[in-house]
Amino acid sequence: MSPRPRRILFGVSGGIAAYKAPDILHGWVKLGFEVETVLTEAAEQFVSPLALSTLSKRRIWRERDFLSAEYGWQIPHISLTDWADLFVIAPCTANVLRAAAQGDGSTLLGAALLANTKPLLLFPAMNSKMLASGPVRENIRILEERGAEIVDPDSGLLACGYEGKGRMPSAAVINDYVLRALCDKKDFAGMRVAVTAGPTHEYIDPVRFISNPSSGKMGYAIAEEAWRRGAEVTLITGPSALRRPAGLEVVEVVSAQDMYQACMKSAETADVIVKAAAVGDYRAAERSEQKIKRGGKDTLTLELVQNPDIAAELGRRKRPGQLLIGFAAETQNVLENAQKKMSEKNLDMIVSNDVLAPGAGFAVDTNAITIMARGAEPLRFSGTKEESAAVILDSVSALAAGR
Ligand code: PMT
């Protein structure tokens, strides 16, 4: 029997950021979640109930439905909170923060907050002076103490014309937090995980570099999944067009030498290191300060020198109990070569992918992998990179449990 869709109770309160609510809701519906929406009276000034009900394919709960003869008998503040897996309020105004912290049940949203026993995720959005005010800080402190997760607003130009902290994060960032809150597996809680992702750029002059087609998708998927499963994550990323995921420490690097430095630093505290980046094995022996000109020459010879092997160095420095996971991008003899890399670099596990196979390897959304861990049978898996990340982390989790 397939599991039932996850259920979100979505509270929208009356700030200008409410205009983003349809976008947020639409993203959840596309992921297959069921969404019930409670709109405050003030929120109706900013966003249309019809837009939200069209997208959620459900009625919208409005203030006039609270204690009304028509719908009040459904006791929405109780039935909705019983029904939901997660209660999200975005935007969450100063007034709703107060109602939540002080237990004001005089509105439908306030009564639902009082009745709620499910995880609560709040996205405050308001003017920066209001956000910094004593009552708002105090209400946030009270709610955090009671277990609510309150996501810090972004900084930038606010609707009131002020420049500062108070903007509601984008729908994509809100979704990162929602997916983490809905993830029941927390097998990486208390662990520090460092993940490398993407390519490196080895510059030969100011405008040209040697690289490879890595997009970062595989590494980013692993970093995000580890974060959802409770880890504190450092993502060490080479140049990549992907959106930087919320909640992670992101370290941006360009060359293999930069990545080496960042990895050695993270390795001092990491419990698990996953090396999904495609690191350039060679760099120019000399990087030209100026753009190299053709100068009428038919050929150009570049001398390359080897970059440090980061994984091998991490393998040498490995602390007792630390797990080092490598990847192998192969075009032939995939499993034999991967096995060899695992022992040469002192890895605990290696994930091999045949980068010439269709739908696997570089810059595609899917992968076909074989996971080889010490003392375990090889495990093959094909699927999206998100699914592959989950399977890889299941194997890491099993290794960690057996340490
Ligand atoms: O980013 P995507 O587009 O999603 O593509 C994903 C991927 C194909 C890049 C990824 O799945 C992958 O296979 N990454 C490893 C690529 C690679 O460099 O493999 P390798 O066989 O050359 O290296 C073996 C291991 O040593 C890797 O963990 C690599 O990170 C590491 N290495 C390699 C060279 C080097 N100088 N230092 C290293 O640490």
Image (cartoon, rainbow, N blue to C red):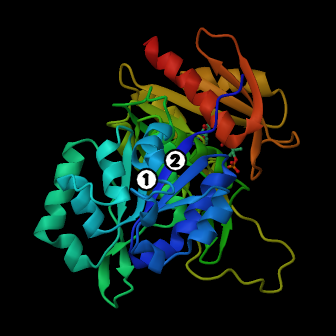
- Give the residue displayed 79% in from the left and 28% down from the top: 334
- Give the residue displayed 39% in from the left and 86% down from the top: 159
Task: Decide which of tag 1 and tag 2 comes sooner along the chain.
Answer: 2
Q: Is residue 232 above or below residue 57?
A: above
Q: Is residue 165 above or below residue 325?
A: below
Q: Is mark 2 within 8 Å of ligand 1?
A: no
Q: Position of residue 107 (x, y in %)?
A: 32, 60
In this view, which residue lies farthest toward the left? 134
Q: Is residue 72 above or below residue 284?
A: above
Q: Which residue is mark 2?
A: 8
Residues at badges 1 and 2 in contact (C-beta under 8 Å)?
Answer: yes
Q: Nearer the viewer, residue 139 or 42?
A: 42
What's under tag 1, amino acid-wise?
Answer: Val
Q: Position of residue 395 (x, y in %)?
A: 58, 22
Name the side, left or right, on which 185 lies relative to 96.
right
- The quarter of the picture where the C terminus appears is top left
Residue 284 in sight from this viewpoint: no
Name the side, left or right, on which 167 lies relative to 353.
left
What's under tag 2, amino acid-wise?
Answer: Ile
- Give the residue displayed 66% in from the left and 49% down from the top: 31
Q: Nearer the viewer, residue 38 or 281?
A: 38
Q: What's the mark number on residue 25?
A: none
Q: Which residue is mark 1?
A: 88
- Give the residue displayed 52% in from the left and 33% down from the top: 312
Image quadrant of ligand 1 equals top right
Q: Position of residue 25 (x, y in %)?
A: 58, 60
Element assignment for label 2: strand
